[in-house]
Amino acid sequence: MYYSPIQVIIIFAMRLIQVYSYLILIRVIMSWVISDPYNKIYYFLVSITEPLLAPIRKLLPAMGLDLSPIIAFFLLNLVSNILSGFL
């Protein structure tokens, strides 16, 4: 099947969004399991995912539970669905 260059870019962006969602999920699970915040893998995940989660965290009211990953999943899914509409 032949894809136009725009379709290739959209598919690539959707795959990046999917990978980013998985990275956020892995970070959330590791934050429950790993007690060492200086773990290299966890530090890498934080450095990759924090640019999206930090602004969301600033918009949410202070509470005992960090809901920013849930909001990020919702936003990433929304963007992915919008992009899939262009295919």
Image: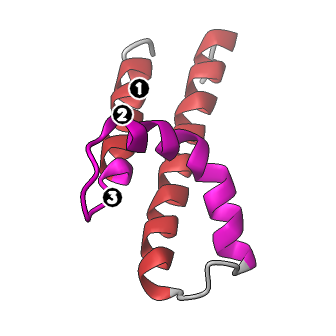
- The residue that disc 3 covers is 66
Counting from the top left corner in percent of width and height, residue 85 is at 36, 16
Residue at left 36%, top 36%?
A: 77
Counting from the top left corner in percent of width and height, residue 5 is at 69, 12
- Amino acid type at image mark 2: Leu
Mark positioned earlier in the residue sequence (3 or 2)? 3
In the displayed image of the protein, which residue is found farthest to the front? Answer: 62
- Amino acid type at image mark 3: Asp
- Amino acid type at image mark 1: Val
Write down the region rendered in magenta: 40-69
Q: Quadrant of the N terminus?
A: top right
With respect to residue 11, does 21 lie above or below?
below
Counting from the top left corner in percent of width and height, residue 35 is at 53, 88
The label shown at residue 64 is none
Please name which of the two marks, 3 or 1, marks the residue nearer to the observer. 3
Mark positioned earlier in the residue sequence (3 or 1)? 3
Counting from the top left corner in percent of width and height, residue 55 is at 48, 36
Q: CA distance from mark 3 to mark 2?
A: 16 Å
- The residue that disc 1 covers is 79
- The residue that disc 2 covers is 75
Q: Residues within 10 Å of mark 3 (few under 14, many from 20)?
A: some
Is 24 on the left-hand or right-hand side of 40? left
Q: CA distance from mark 1 to mark 2?
A: 6 Å
Is 63 on the left-hand or right-hand side of 14? left
Q: Main secondary structure of the magenta part?
A: helix
